[in-house]
Amino acid sequence: GGKGSEAPRERRPPVSVAAVLPAGGSGERLGGCTPKQFCALLGRPLVSYTVRAMERISWISDIVVVVSPENVEVMKSIIKKYGHKRTTVAEGGMTRHRSIFNGLKKIAESHLLSSPLQKPEVVIIHDAVRPFVEEDILFKVVMAAKEHGAAGAICPLVSTVIASSADGCLDHSLDRAKYRASEMPQAFLFDIIHQAYHQCSDYDLDYGTECLHLALKYNKTNAKLIEGPPDLWKVTYKRDLYAADSLIKDNISQQVCVLTNMKEDAVQVGFLLHETLKSHVKLVKAISTSLCKNESHLQNILLGQCYNFICINDNLSNFQETHQLVEILENTNASLLYSVVLISVYLDFFENVSFISAMQRFTKFAKEVEKKNILLYGLSIHYQKDNLKLQETMDSAAALIMALIRDRNPAYVGQLLVA
Amino acid sequence: GGKGSEAPRERRPPVSVAAVLPAGGSGERLGGCTPKQFCALLGRPLVSYTVRAMERISWISDIVVVVSPENVEVMKSIIKKYGHKRTTVAEGGMTRHRSIFNGLKKIAESHLLSSPLQKPEVVIIHDAVRPFVEEDILFKVVMAAKEHGAAGAICPLVSTVIASSADGCLDHSLDRAKYRASEMPQAFLFDIIHQAYHQCSDYDLDYGTECLHLALKYNKTNAKLIEGPPDLWKVTYKRDLYAADSLIKDNISQQVCVLTNMKEDAVQVGFLLHETLKSHVKLVKAISTSLCKNESHLQNILLGQCYNFICINDNLSNFQETHQLVEILENTNASLLYSVVLISVYLDFFENVSFISAMQRFTKFAKEVEKKNILLYGLSIHYQKDNLKLQETMDSAAALIMALIRDRNPAYVGQLLVA
Ligand SMILES: [Mg+2]
Ligand SMILES: [Mg+2]
């Protein structure tokens, strides 16, 4: 049908592609016990973010995650819990190269055995600890691998590289302009890298770190080098987990959806909030009729990866609109990959005589829905006819909303803030 | 007197030491307009953190910050605003090496002119965008410079380093085990590095990046290389600002001071809070008499760099204890370098009939003290005789307190949370 025509920015390489994700590192540099690929970011293991980055690209047919033997079951449960498709687990070896080789063997053997995994023309190799990989660089390395046999992303060196003498003194320093840092993703014609691993020495397998080097040494393939964006960096230290956490929060704070009912005050507050938030977020969608009639509209918003909702409630005692929205979020599994922030807005909450019992009900409800990865916060807005004062209140409300959305802090779940 | 005896961990190198901080970078990699050294972290420019890291070390006699001509006044105002001592500004050149050279010349000439700057035996060179430098590594590079003439911190390479051919393909990759990343701080006998800069070519000054290289090339000095901690890394990309922000917040969330009056309920809540928080923070100090009698005790706590206070209030209508503490914080300039978090605790806030006006007064007061970099939050604790339920409430209070302290988010200033 007409909907089947490809969007202009969807590019598909004219080759079949699979990906191997080495995830066997021990995480010693972090100083903690959990290997970094299994560290939780916003409650989800880092490796799941990287798998997702691959999975969402339709032209990558299979993803093989290689983990150390003791983590095979952990990885399988991660794949199951987060519903990752086209993803299988392979058991790693003692070193990075042996693990990647195992991943390649799994793909090659599975072809011979005619299992669901198809031997691809091109294989991408990408670290499980580089979660921010985008389609653009993947497409580029795959196309370059098709032409050159091998390709890899590179970045400028941040520090000068030096060689030391035996006594720990400077021997020489390298000219920074002539060298680059070799990053991931890399891509290879499958047969080239598979053969290189078959031919390479035990010394290479045990001490080597660079796949491009193997393709050069054993296949005389000079890999094409492609400048990558800075977000390809490898999560290595504790500070990198902090950076990744903030970048993920940035990514999912871009869109906010405002929902109001048709009552006059709520409509006005919804409209003003919508206008005020426009200067803070990229996209604000508003629905101003009842939720049940708009469930398909809401489904589209959820498909567009909106993880932030503001719901203006009419009635303090039952907050019906919030309940309805929670139900829809639950039914659509909207909070599977990321927590959903839901800010429930009330006009003049504290002026209601029964506010204490309403507050208790709200807090209790919020603790319940937190189990489903929905972070529910309350916001009381003082509604006043004076337009100037009302706009001041809206600015204050927008600041609170942006902070709640940006921080996604479970500690404040069920609290009622005042704008 | 007896107090003059040195604490065991205070080590002073047996040489005079000054420091040059190049801060002239343009910050292109960040993609923003503000050069990274002037980016605000928790409201204060990054360069001020680095200056402070140097300034607190008593054996560094002078700190020269080299900035581009257009930022000289900005840098002077930063030094003034944050009260940095022993710190002067030098005007930078077109490149990193020319800027460092200018810093060294400022020190050398100022010696001839017998200005306050003394020509030191050893000079430290350290980037303004590496704020987490500790005394230990500074001591080590200075001692090694005294012995070897030059020394610098190094770190393991995170990525493999490769050389590309003219057509953008892999030429060869370096064995990661044989190379290191050259980081900062570095230290030199002043005359060695000063002479190297005088002798080096315009090409070196325009295209070089490595001070250790100049000492080797022009003085045949093989710098001693010293493994540094990972926190020496250079704030280069946006993600590095996020990481630095989180690490700074970690550093100032370690200590909490709990203040209570002598009323029975407040004392019990203070005691329980103190016990509960112990498992979250390194050090909790409690004062359970009136503030005015303990001002000198409090001064010591402030000197110990405690930036987090919990104040249990007796009376809803005047929150006298909080007012007193704010006054002391203001008088001691406690919030000059870091925001001070002050959590004002009330027992059963909402059960008081006049809570709405109390809330308004509290919010207004909080907005006032925010101007002085004091972040005031309210916390209502439901006081109940049932010990089990009270402990549950305390756990909830501790979680809220830790979140407020860790986030230091100005958006929630003046809000009243409920445990
Ligand atoms: Mg790794
Ligand atoms: Mg720099």
Image (cartoon, coloured by chain):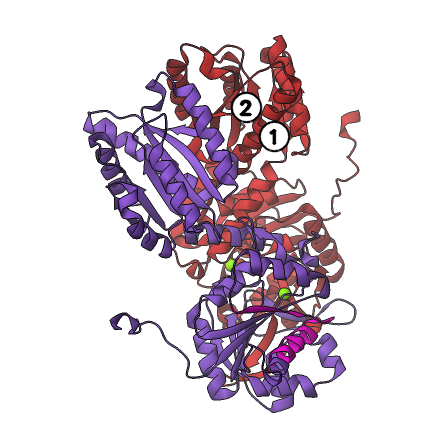
Chain colours: A purple, B red
Quadrant of image for the C terminus of chain A: top left
Q: Residue at x 61, y 90 (%)?
A: A219
- Would you call the spot at circle 2 few (<14 residues within 10 Å), some (14-19), or many (20 or more)? few
Give the amino acid type for the residue marked by disc 2 in the picture: Thr
**Disc 2 marks which residue?**
B332
Task: Specify the segment rendered in magenta.
Answer: A86-107
Q: Nearer the viewer, mark 2 or mark 1?
A: 1
Q: Is mark 2 within 8 Å of ligand 2?
A: no
Q: State the image coordinates of residue B10 (x, y, percent, origin top left).
A: 75, 40
**The disc numbered 2 marks a residue on which chain?**
B
| Viewer-closest of A408 and B202 | A408
The mark that comes first in sequence, 2 or 1, is: 1
Is residue A92 one of those drawn in magenta? yes
Q: State the image coordinates of residue A226 (x, y, percent, origin top left).
A: 47, 77
**Disc 1 marks which residue?**
B306
Q: Residue at x 20, y 31 (%)?
A: A264
Secondary element at tag 1: loop
Q: Is residue A298 above or below residue A355?
A: below
**The disc numbered 1 marks a residue on which chain?**
B
